[in-house]
Amino acid sequence: MTHVSPAMAVRVWLFLVAATVTSGWLVEHHSVAGRWTAAAVMLVAALKGRAVLLYFMELKGAPRAWRVAFELWIWLCAAVIVALWALGGGA
């Protein structure tokens, strides 16, 4: 199993912080993305979840089947949430 270097951990952490700030800003200023704000926030959430899985839970060095399963799970969950939001009338 490969370990994440401290430099990579800091870069991923900075990405997570920036993504969180961006999501918060988008929610507060939803007129920028319009009715797609929820989809944009879910995209950011999926990217954040993927980063945590790959780098902090060290899934990047896991067997391919585990990685594919968890990556599919992240994207499927995000897609279902956005689809249900859109079917419910969106904004």
Image (cartoon, rainbow, N blue to C red):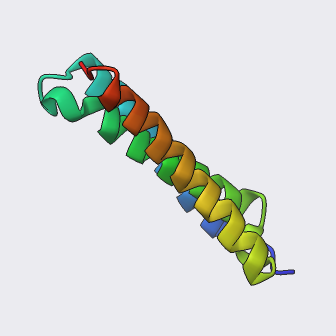
Q: Give the percent coordinates (x, y) of residue 78.
A: 49, 44
User: Could you say which is closer to the camera, residue 57 or residue 12?
Assistant: 57
Residue at the location (22% across, 35% down)? 36
Q: Quadrant of residue 54?
A: bottom right
User: Could you say which is closer to the camera, residue 12 or residue 28?
Assistant: 28
User: Could you say which is closer to the camera, residue 50 or residue 7?
Assistant: 50
Q: Is residue 49 above or below residue 87?
A: below
Residue at the location (20% across, 23% down)? 30
Where's the N terminus, which quadrant?
Answer: bottom right
Report whether 89 appears left or right of 49.
Answer: left
Where's the C terminus, which quadrant?
Answer: top left
Q: Quadrant of residue 22?
A: top left
Q: Is residue 73 above or below residue 26?
A: below
User: Which residue is outermost to the front?
Assistant: 87
Report whether 64 appears left or right of 27.
Answer: right
Q: Quadrant of residue 57?
A: bottom right
User: Could you say which is closer to the camera, residue 2 or residue 37?
Assistant: 37
Report whether 70 appears left or right of 13.
Answer: right
Q: Give the percent coordinates (x, y) of residue 52.
A: 66, 53
Residue at the location (27% across, 23% down)? 90
